[in-house]
Image (cartoon, coloured by chain):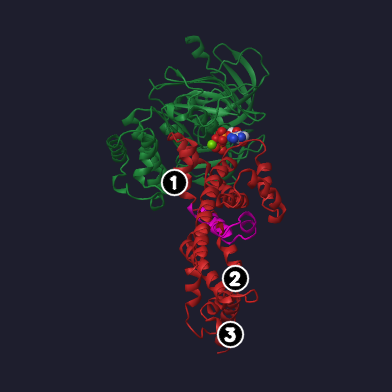
Amino acid sequence: MNRTVLRLLKRLGFYALIAVVLFYAIFPFYYAVVTSLKPSSELFRVDFWPSSFDLVNYARILGEKSFVRAILNSILVSFSVVFIALLLGLTASYALGRVRFRGRTSVLLIILGVSMFPQVAVLSGLFEVIRVLDLYNNPAGLVLSYTIFTLPFTVWVLTTFMRQLPQELEEAAIMDGATPWITITRVFLPLMWPAMATTGLLAFIAAWNEFLFALTFTLTDDQRTVPVAIALISGGSQHELPWGPIMAASVTVTVPLVVLVMIFQRRIVSGLTAGAVKG
Amino acid sequence: MASVTLEKLNKVFGNTQIIKDVDLTIGDGEFVVFVGPSGCGKSTLLRLIAGLESITDGELSIGERVVNDLPPRERGVGMVFQSYALYPHMTVYDNMAFGLKLAKADDQTVEQRVMETARTLQLETLLERKPKELSGGQRQRVAMGRAMARNPQILLFDEPLSNLDASLRVQMRNEIAQLHHRRGSTVVYVTHDQVEAMTLADKIVVLRDGRIEQVGSPQTLYQRPATRFVAGFIGSPTMNFLPAELCDASPDGCRVAVAGVGELDLHQDAGETSGQRLTLGIRPEHLRLDAAEGDNRFTIVNVEYLGNEVYVYLEPREGDTLLIHRSEAPSDWQVGQDVALHVDVEHAHLFDASDRALTIATQRHAA
Ligand SMILES: Nc1ncnc2c1ncn2[C@@H]1O[C@H](COP(=O)(O)OP(=O)(O)OP(=O)(O)O)[C@@H](O)[C@H]1O
Ligand SMILES: [Mg+2]
């Protein structure tokens, strides 16, 4: 009797804890969704339940040409970053994880070290680079700068993963007559999907949400990415902060991320734990 | 056609020399087995032949061609790895077809070669499976199939059976032997297991610290080991070694004194110097036990009954390696009993102070 009560209490405590964590994690987003669905007249009444279902904010946001353009820019930039980072990361990780050469460890440490700098530290230097390359106010400049920040992490994770693949697998491919490029693309790549999905997704999220570079390296509305576009949404007057549209815009651009994570969720988990046990 | 010749082959890793001046000829169609203790360089030598390691010095030829600088795919070799190393994301069919496709064989040839190989290895029903859906023995066969699919002239195996359990190992051992008979390709095979070496090999190469200790047929190595190392390495249970002193030598033989056993007349030609320190080597089955008499007295410390035979372990006079006697079951010997040792001099081996085997005197006359 006593034991069942105790077990029940433990259960309860467990779920209570989960509820707290979930609430903590989800509430801000939930509140954003609720706010975005309100007409501006009700904006500053605190409601915890959706009191209305008004899509006017969404209509306004998606009706704005510059915002739609920003979404397209973001998609272009983020996918380019992911593609380039994975391509370079994969080839670099082959060299760093598989080829024995002098100074390999130092190279890895430098790569990791680079990623520790705060963005602001490289901002002015990068600005010069981008001006020299004539990429100012051009999404390509963003792709370049995001890749610089994404690559170290990508290379690091992929190298760790690549090292865990058995040596004999590569040698078997060599015996079958495979060149390094074929070994990477036909033998390693299919085995590295989990790691690729994980790093690719993280690179995507980083590129999608980046603000500082996007603000600094673009000038005109039609070159902006979503985070900057959201920040620059202006209200009817100088003194009005248009919360409704801002929330609607935020929700609009977050949903794709959530969907992506859901799709790749299983891959990510297996990517993070792969190699823990021998298959 | 597909003979392999190693001439003064050397391999250095960093500052350590792993393979030292290895000379070896492997004939076309021969089944050659490398054995030796762990770390002696068996795998390294195999990988040098495969082309997975670069040759530091010396010359390696396959057929008439020097292949030192050729990549593996141009050497006409196939390799089976210890861990199989099958491509996990490919089906059995694709695993075997991979090399053929890379060699730009046309679809029909690929299919024909793969199906042929699959038939030889009884893999036809498994072609659509992934490696993780196969048993250990089946994976082993796929690994062999992958190595064979391109029809290499030389097959290399690096401890291919060491991941299998005992009964499967016997079965696969037989399959490999049959396969070799049927295909007739040259095989180089690395193993720890001397039963595998004895049963499979046409020629056994015993390696020690990167050098060849002896090359010969299983019979030669068992019956006439050239050194004490080979004598101790080949044969299970291992040969017994007893310190002996040379009393008298003549052109037809010699007389040695062995502590406890007494004086023995052997056929070996021991040269001239009497008083030499020698080592008597005698296999467990060439010892006879009797009731103890006089000084010939050894204590039984353990008796192992194996069903068909019995191993009796005896306390040695010197050192701490137990002496082993092997006989057909049943046997009445008991632990704690004292027994006398009798050596079958026809089968005794004698090693000099530098552990080289002394030759039989009559043999030398005949030669
Ligand atoms: N890539 C390498 N770099 C440095 N040393 C190596 C390398 N590969 C092998 N060795 C050394 O060479 C020696 C022989 O290794 P090898 O793998 O040939 O031994 P083996 O006879 O196959 O042993 P085992 O029976 O345990 O497999 C070992 O001492 C090993 O440490
Ligand atoms: Mg080895």
Task: Measuring from the top left, give residue B263's x and y in whole percent.
Answer: 61, 24
Q: Chain of mark 3?
A: A
**Which quadrant holds residue B212?**
top right
Where does the magenta region start and end?
A193-222
Depth check, front residue: A249 or B174: A249
- Mark 1 Cα-neighbour bin, 10 Å: few <14, some 14–19, many ≥20: few
Color used for chain A? red
Q: Is residue B153 visible?
A: yes
Q: Secondary structure at mark 3?
A: helix
Depth check, front residue: A154 or A37: A37
Please state which amino acid type lies under the numbered disc 3: Leu
Assign the magenta stretch its main secondary structure.
helix
**Horizontally, is B278 left or right of B195 in the view?**
right
Whichever of callouts 2 and 3 sits on the residue coming sooner in the sequence is: 3
Q: Name the residue tied to disc 2.
A: A234
Name the residue located 53 percent from the left edge and 48 percent from the top edge.
A84
Q: Chain of mark 1?
A: B
Please state which amino acid type lies under the numbered disc 1: Ala
Q: Name the residue tied to disc 3.
A: A9
Q: Nearer the viewer, mark 1 or mark 2?
A: 2
Name the residue located 46 percent from the left edge and 63 percent from the top edge.
A263
Q: Name the residue tied to disc 1.
A: B166
- Mark 2 Cα-neighbour bin, 10 Å: few <14, some 14–19, many ≥20: some
Label 1 – label 2 distance at C-alpha? 77 Å
Q: Is residue B201 above or below residue A58?
A: above
